[in-house]
Image (spheres, helix red, strand yellow):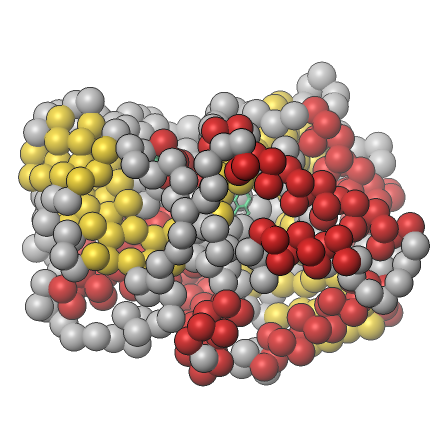
Amino acid sequence: MSSSTVNGGISFWYAQDGIPAPREPLPGDTTADVCVVGGGFTGLWTAYYLKKAAPFLNITVLEAKFCGYGASGRNGGWLYNGIAGRDTYALKNGHDAAVRLQKAMNDTVAEVVRVAADESIDADIHQGGVLEVAYTPAQLARLKDFHTTEIAFGETDRVLRGARETAERVRVTGAVGSTWTPHGARLHPVKLLKGLAAAVEALGVTIHESTPVTEIKPKHAITPYGTVRAPYVLRCTEGFTAGLKGQRRTWLPMNSSMIATEPLPARIWDTIGWDGRETLGDMAHAYMYAQRTADDRIAIGGRGVPYRYGSRTDNDGRTQPATIAALRDILVRFFPTTAGVHIDHAWSGVLAVPRDWCATVTLDRATGLGWAGGYVGSGVATTNLAARTLRDLIQQDSGQAGPTDLTTLPWVNHKVRKWEPEPLRWLGVHTLYAAYRTADRQETNSPTLQTPRLARTANRVSGRH
Ligand SMILES: Cc1cc2nc3c(=O)[nH]c(=O)nc-3n(C[C@H](O)[C@H](O)[C@H](O)COP(=O)(O)OP(=O)(O)OC[C@H]3O[C@@H](n4cnc5c(N)ncnc54)[C@H](O)[C@@H]3O)c2cc1C
């Protein structure tokens, strides 16, 4: 890592766009119709859609730090149609139910783009779709399976490309094939987040920052500054959920880390291509994700140290030098002409992993408590679908509307068991990621068509598939 690489500072996106002026903390005890805990995409989209649907509602958002402090202000800016758990929902609720979920996700990408335009939010959105590449035989076999599966779930507009066609899009060294879907866009997460927070406030929602909720109870959100009493209290705290009283083993906080290069000159882009600005991923077990930013950098992410003992979460986005070096290695492996480029920024964030790796959205009608999350690594679009679903569930519960297409999707009110206590949790996750790294090395060093047994076992043991 170069001494001039910024490490942390929440994220590169904030370094570029500025940390916003703070909003006032909760002034004392108060009441609301709906209290949203957490000012990331889940919380803000939920406030947005609820207030749009029912402008008379008194909605308060409580945010521990500042809006977008979490994953929503740190992610890779892949707005795409992936949703964690779809295949499990297909097994549990039937194929057709999962197809409805997938179609809802496809529509969600378009919905985010639409609202950004309606609200005049310039979030550097570029609808180039999602390109995922394979560069070993086993990855190619997985890629083809993945491609076929996605088509079976209704993505008839997906395209499989060979080595030459892939290189015409992006010249990834050694790429032997790719799959592309139009249901994806690149964006600047912080620009979207800030625009959304401003839109929510303009609608009349109250946002209090620097206000950590210590406990959520039916009809109560308790903070050091006072308590908000509300018939509906919605937990939108994703990777930070373990910090709430009684939630330590609900979702596991998993780290993901990123680096952003300096803006690359035209002579390097000439060697890479990537004119379509697709979001770019691979089929490795410890996969990478990347985007070409609006100002021509490459922002690339992957797993760092995956999990910290005791579900500890954050140090304002700092990541380990070894993770930065590993991400740089991936960058240069993909694009050798970037070997000399400067890494301007490195950071990390937490996402939530449920025990069965399935995202959920829930409203408990007995208590008025709701939550959405467990998106694993796919939340930029999924948060929007979750928010519209929470809106519909609340409208249904309060007698303002009946069931909708969204309230009957298979991820609604899904129950999952808790994670194991420590040290099993720590050991399990570290063993899982060590297995993935070893499997990736095996696939690269001794190419076979088969995914190594180690990775298959890791998937099974972790509850991932
Ligand atoms: C490095 C990284 C890269 C990613 N890349 C992508 C990507 O490219 N595409 C994609 O689809 N997904 C990606 N994800 C996942 C995606 O960013 C998240 O799923 C999504 O942003 C989750 O939004 P959220 O609002 O549920 O959670 P968050 O954005 O984490 O928001 C939770 C908020 O709650 C606040 N909070 C926490 N505890 C409390 C409390 N007790 N009281 C009050 N407030 C509290 C936090 O401060 C935070 O602001 C990535 C995640 C990471 C970490």
Residue at x-position 14% and y-position 39%: 220
Ligand 1 placement by image quarter: top left
Q: Residue furthest right?
A: 446
Tell me how many marks there are: 0
Viewer-closest of 7 and 360: 360
- Identified at 21% across, 57% down, the residue is 364
Q: Quadrant of residue 318?
A: top right
Spot occupied by residue 258 in the image (x, y as percentages of width and height): 63, 38
Who's the residue at 66% across and 40% down the image?
Answer: 431
Viewer-side residue, 407 vs 277: 407
Percent coordinates x, y for residue 459 in the rendering: 64, 56
Of the 4 image quadrants, the one containing the C terminus is bottom right
Asked if residue 233 is positioned above or below residue 402 in the image, the reply reads above
Whether residue 23 is visible: no
Q: Specify whether 367 is left or right of 391.
A: left
* Foreground pick, 198 / 395: 395
Which of the two residues, 228 or 113, is positioned nearer the viewer here? 228
Q: Residue at x 74, y 21 (%)?
A: 2
From where the camera sits, is residue 283 visible? yes
| Residue 428 in picture, x, y percent from top left | 59, 41
Q: Is residue 338 above or below residue 227?
A: below
